[in-house]
Amino acid sequence: MPPKLKTVLIWIVAIFLVYAIVTSPDRAADLVRALWDMITGAFTSFGTFFSGLTE
């Protein structure tokens, strides 16, 4: 991907995120919480899997 295009896409995503947070902060917070729960759930599942291998 060309560097200029990558920079433009990053700016577009950043502007959209700021817009989404400003227009509906509660919904944005719910989205962040849901993403965080998915990430922590994935790491917990990996931990359970690897601990199951050692038993």
Image: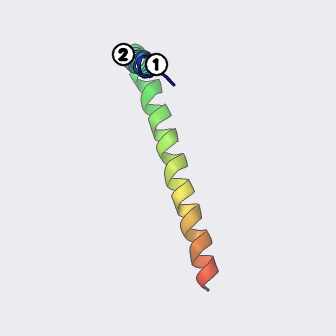
Q: Residue furthest front?
A: 2
Q: Secondary structure at mark 1?
A: helix
Residue under the point 42% across and 22% down: 3
Q: Residue at x 55, y 47 (%)?
A: 38
> Seen in the image, is 34 located left or right of residue 8?
right
Q: Is residue 4 left or right of residue 39?
A: left
Residue 13: percent from left, percent from top: 44, 20
Q: Which mark is residue 23?
A: none
The residue that label 2 is drawn on is: 22
Q: Residues within 10 Å of mark 2 (few under 14, many from 20)?
A: few
| Quadrant hosting residue 42 | bottom right
> Of residues 5 and 45, which is closer to you in this image?
5
Q: Position of residue 16 (x, y in %)?
A: 44, 16
Image coords of residue 53 (percent x, y): 63, 79
x, y percentage for residue 35?
51, 40
**Residue at point 39% right, 22% down?**
25
The numbered mark, 1 or 2, whose residue comes first in the sequence reads 1
Q: Is residue 32 above or below residue 53?
A: above
Q: Label 2 near label 1: C-beta < 8 Å?
A: no
Mark 2: which amino acid? Val
Q: Determine the residue positioned at 37% across, 18% down.
A: 18
Q: CA distance from mark 1 to mark 2?
A: 20 Å
- The residue where tag 1 is placed is 9
Q: Furthest residue to the bottom?
A: 55
Label 1 vs label 2, nearer the camera: 1
